[in-house]
Image (cartoon, rainbow, N blue to C red):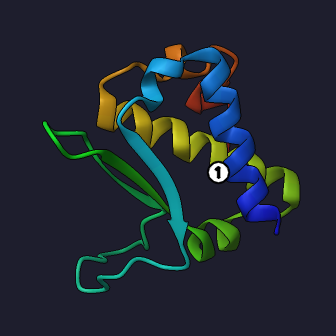
């Protein structure tokens, strides 16, 4: 399964570059978001909640929307990684460039 491998690779990369970002966080994926009522113009690619005392934080990627927006396996891997980095940054407060210093700026990448 290409998607699961892409998630595993992304988390592995972040584990090497910024292991503290994963402390108290779980990362997984579902096919689609559970609540369709919250959708406006776009289907979300992921959701994140920060850790709280006694409760782990969570990043959930939505497989089908990400696959739909990816034109190739390489684009899929890149979109998965960018999404994991952005969601972890939002949930932990750690800047994206600290999570992955090699990630190109948003201006240099189009989904």
Q: Tell me which residue sits at (29%, 82%) in the image.
A: 35
Q: Residue at x 57, y 32 (%)?
A: 106
Q: Position of residue 111 (x, y in %)?
A: 66, 52
Query: Is any part of residue 65 visible from this angle?
Result: yes
| Quadrant holding the N terminus | bottom right
Q: Is residue 42 left or right of residue 61?
A: left
Residue at 39% over, 40% down:
25
Question: Disc 1 on helix, strand or loop?
Answer: helix
* Front residue of this view, candidates 100 and 11: 11
Q: Is 41 positioned to the left or the right of 108 in the image?
A: left
- Residue 87 sits above or below residue 48 on the image: above
Q: In the image, is 66 to the left or to the right of 94?
A: right
Q: Quadrant of residue 63?
A: bottom right
Q: Examine the rendered structure and indicate whether residue 59 appears above or below residue 88.
A: below
How crowded pointer 1 is (Cα within 10 Å; few <14, some 14-19, many 20+) is rated as many
Q: Which residue is mark 1?
A: 80
Query: In the image, residue 29 lies at what x, y percent?
Result: 53, 65
Q: Position of residue 65 (x, y in %)?
A: 57, 72
Front residue of 6/68: it is 6
Q: Nearer the viewer, residue 31 or 45?
A: 31
* Residue 76 placement: quadrant: bottom right
The image shows residue 41, relative to residue 26, as above or below, that is below
Q: Residue at x 31, y 37 (%)?
A: 91
Q: Is residue 109 visible?
A: no
Q: How many marks?
A: 1
- Residue 46 lies left or right of residue 11; in this view the side is left
Looking at the image, the residue that sits furthest to the bottom is: 36
Q: Position of residue 37 (x, y in %)?
A: 23, 85
């Amino acid at each position: 399964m290409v998607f699961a491998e892409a998630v595993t690779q992304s988390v592995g990369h972040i584990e090497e570059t910024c292991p503290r970002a994963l402390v108290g966080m779980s990362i997984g994926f579902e096919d689609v978001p559970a609540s369709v009522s919250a959708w406006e113009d776009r289907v979300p690619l992921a959701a994140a909640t920060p850790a709280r005392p006694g409760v782990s934080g969570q990043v959930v990627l939505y497989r089908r929307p990400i696959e739909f927006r990816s034109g190739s396996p390489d684009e899929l891997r890149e979109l998965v990684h960018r999404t994991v980095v952005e969601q972890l940054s939002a949930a932990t407060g750690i800047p994206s460039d600290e999570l992955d210093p090699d990630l190109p700026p948003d201006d240099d990448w189009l989904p």
